[in-house]
Image: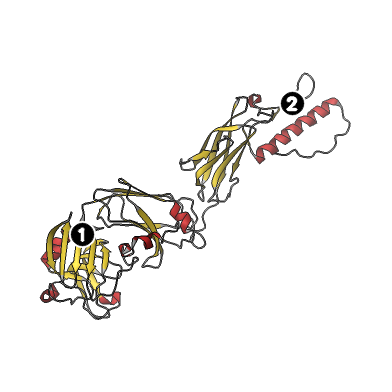
Amino acid sequence: MFTPLLPPTPEVPLRSRQIRRQIRVGHICALLAAASLTATGCTAAADTPGGEPKAKTDGARQGEDGRPVTVTVTPQGDRAAAGEPVRVTAEAGTLTSVTVTDDKGRTLAGTASADGRTWTSDRVAAPGATYTVKAATRTGGGRAGTAGSSFTTAPADKVNKVDWRPGDGAVVGVAQPISLVFDHPVENKAAVEKQLRVTTSNSTEGSWGWLTDWSGKDRVDWRPKEYFEPGTKVTLDARLNGVDSGEDGGWFVRDYKVGFTVGDRRIVRVDLDDKQLTLERDGAVVRRIPVSGGTPGGDKRSWRGTAVLMSKEGTIRMNSETVGLGSAYDKMVDYSMRLTWSGMYAHAAPWNAEYLGKANRSSGCIGMSDPDAAWLYGQVRVGDPFEIEGADTKGALAPHNGLGVWNVDWADWQAKSALR
């Protein structure tokens, strides 16, 4: 608040002085309104019996010291900076309520200070949005007032988007992590992770971990300490609207909410030494299947560790050139169940019939007969773990190769969080 300096007034007749004083009062009020929101309207009064005009307020609502209650809002203007909370401050009075609404009708929740003089939004202002602020005030003497304002944030010069797994409403296996892959780099990992809220129906312990995805993009996964309990309901509330990814990453301009349910406990155990695959359901063995894994001694070996079933892709064309194995094969393959980004599947392999259960002679996949593959395809679901072991493999499956997060021990996984 300030008072403008005015030039001296020459001697003029009384009526002219009255008119000039009226103009000054109106000018001062206009400046005050431009500087802040005033819960008590400032206007020039009509001529009074004493011949002197007066400035009056809306219902003469004054603060404890006789001043009007003044409300200030930040950010301000038509191209305000995004990414900051909305703050509302009352001078010479208190705030009794504050409502902040964007141009899509969504409200920003907030918290008032103990003395009732300030209010701060829980969320930040998003880019390219117009916000309307309405505040109700009260003076020390108990007089009520209102104030209103609006501001518009500058639009985002780059927008960051998210691709996530699993899909909303899915029923998944007990090993399914939440996996988010970002279109652009995320430098402000801690700021992003703070906005990712996972809730479960049974208080499952879990942690986020940051990775570089197989595609080279930034990625963050949430996995529980142990496999989920069957029946667990999981919700991800990614409150990212208005969060800055950092340099080269751009802004998030929307929120994401995903919910899924964990189905019964199905574990596929693959023993490459014995060339056997075993499906267990709720702790009981359902069936054993003879298989043939990756050929020992070279690049055609299989990976070991826990792979999570990523997708059931049916009949697909498999070409060895796409996985760096030259012209080894190019064929249509039935009952294809993807386990990694690098090309390891479980699938039907009738051309390898003589080796099933006897020798590992595939190009890295877990092959089985047509009838066995058809049966297994109908039994497993996305999110089921394939626990693969064997003496002669390429090594442990990396966490970014598919959904290989279970191949990191719990303490090391927690250390991958940006908030640790």
Q: Which part of the image, by quadrant, shows the C terminus?
A: bottom left
Name the residue type under label 1.
Ile
Determine the residue positioned at 72% across, 33% down.
Answer: 26
Q: What x and y, as percent, mark residue 373?
A: 15, 65
Q: Residue at x 87, y 27 (%)?
A: 13
Q: In what element is the residue under mark 1?
A: strand
User: Could you say which quadrant of the image residue 341 lies in?
Assistant: bottom left
Report the side of 131 relative to 300 (left or right): right
Quadrant where the N terminus sits is top right
Q: Tag 1: Cα neighbours inside 10 Å, few (<14), some, or many (≥20)? A: many
**Disc assigned to residue 267:** 1
Residue at left offset 87%, top offset 30%: 12
Q: Where residue 415 appears, x then y in whole percent?
A: 41, 61
Observer-side mark, 2 or 1, equals 1
Asked whether, in this view, residue 384 is left or right of residue 257, the answer is: left
The label shown at residue 54 is 2
Indicate whether 396 appears above or below 100: below
**In the image, is 213 to the left or to the right of 73?**
left
343 to the left or right of 416: left
**Disc 2 vs disc 1: Cβ atoms closer than 8 Å?**
no
**Location of residue 272 (image quadrant):** bottom left
Q: How far from the left and from the top, in percent, is residue 150?
A: 56, 41
Amino acid under disc 2: Lys
Percent of width and height locating residue 340: 28, 67
User: In front here: 48 or 175?
Assistant: 175
Report the front residue among 122 and 147: 122
Residue 149 image label: none
